[in-house]
Image: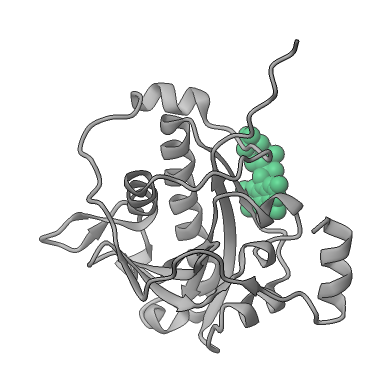
Amino acid sequence: MNTLTKMALGLMGQLKARPARGTTAQSLALAPPGRAGGVPLMQALWQRQSQREFGTQPLSEPVLGELVWAAAGVNRPSLGGRTAPSAMNSQEVDVFVALPSGLYRYDPEAHALRLEVHSDVRGITGYQDFTDEAALDLVFVADHRRMALVPASQREAYAFAAAGAMAQNVYLYCASQGLATVIRAWIDRQALGQAMDLGADQQVLLAQTVGYPKQVPAER
Ligand SMILES: Cc1cc2nc3c(=O)[nH]c(=O)nc-3n(C[C@H](O)[C@H](O)[C@H](O)COP(=O)(O)O)c2cc1C
């Protein structure tokens, strides 16, 4: 769906999720992340960029597992520490994964995806048309209930900062794996919050599309 149509439907309160496609599971165990592989960090930094042309192929299971682990995984199990920082270690940002088969929430402790909504919400994660068909869209959602120790006036800013750190982890993982990605704030937050069935304490922060780069046909 093109951007203008999305904007018009959003204004009318009619921007809705599509029916889920493919096999939907209540819970998806993910392959454990590797401890090696990818390109050196300096090379990934040289290659980091936003891309907005995506192929439609799904990510392989190992890549999906490493992608969400890069965003928010547990990297120090004895402490429950995560790959991305959070103010006072509040760990207030959840990573949702919008796939054709449904909307899942990443459970870092179990390293698994939990089904939240049995619909394809990819197209509602942003006004740009590529969100509809790229392999997946991540949505970073703050849960304000976990920020009791943070002064109320700072909660939103801290949560955005934490989501930004997660997004940069995803950028570097994508650079390392030859995946395309773009972080996005241009979102109909009301439509997305409704489609995701979020509660009053949950706030959509940012979204990030991830997929294989679109193959450009070879010139003859
Ligand atoms: C907070 C934030 C919000 C952004 N929102 C969008 C967006 O809604 N759509 C989009 O295509 N790009 C978005 N971007 C990506 C920027 O346009 C991109 O990072 C910038 O043009 C620099 O390009 P680069 O990432 O390739 O260096 C956003 C970036 C940030 C940091």
> Which residue is at the front of the view, 150 or 86?
86
Quarter of the image where the N terminus is located: bottom right
Q: Which residue is drawn at 65% across and 64% down?
A: 125
| Residue 192: % across, % down | 65, 74
Task: Please determine whether, in this image, residue 88 is positioned above or below residue 182.
Answer: below
| Residue 174: % across, % down | 46, 37
- Looking at this view, name the residue that lies furthest to the top: 220
Q: Is residue 113 left or right of residue 136?
A: left
Q: Residue at x 49, y 66 (%)?
A: 159
Task: Place residue 205 in its image quadrant.
Answer: bottom right
| Residue 172: % across, % down | 44, 37
Q: Residue at x 10, y 60 (%)?
A: 78
Q: Residue at x 39, y 50 (%)?
A: 64
- The image's colouring method is one colour
Task: Place residue 28 in its image quadrant.
Answer: bottom left
| Residue 113: % across, % down | 35, 66
Q: Is residue 18 left or right of residue 163?
A: right
Task: Please determine whether, in this image, residue 56 is positioned above or below residue 74.
Answer: above
> Which residue is at the front of the view, 146 or 67?
67
| Ligand 1: image quarter | top right
- Looking at this view, name the residue that lies furthest to the left: 78
Task: Please determine whether, in this image, residue 198 is positioned above or below residue 90.
Answer: below
Quarter of the image where the C terminus is located: top right
How many numbered circles does the render carry? Answer: 0
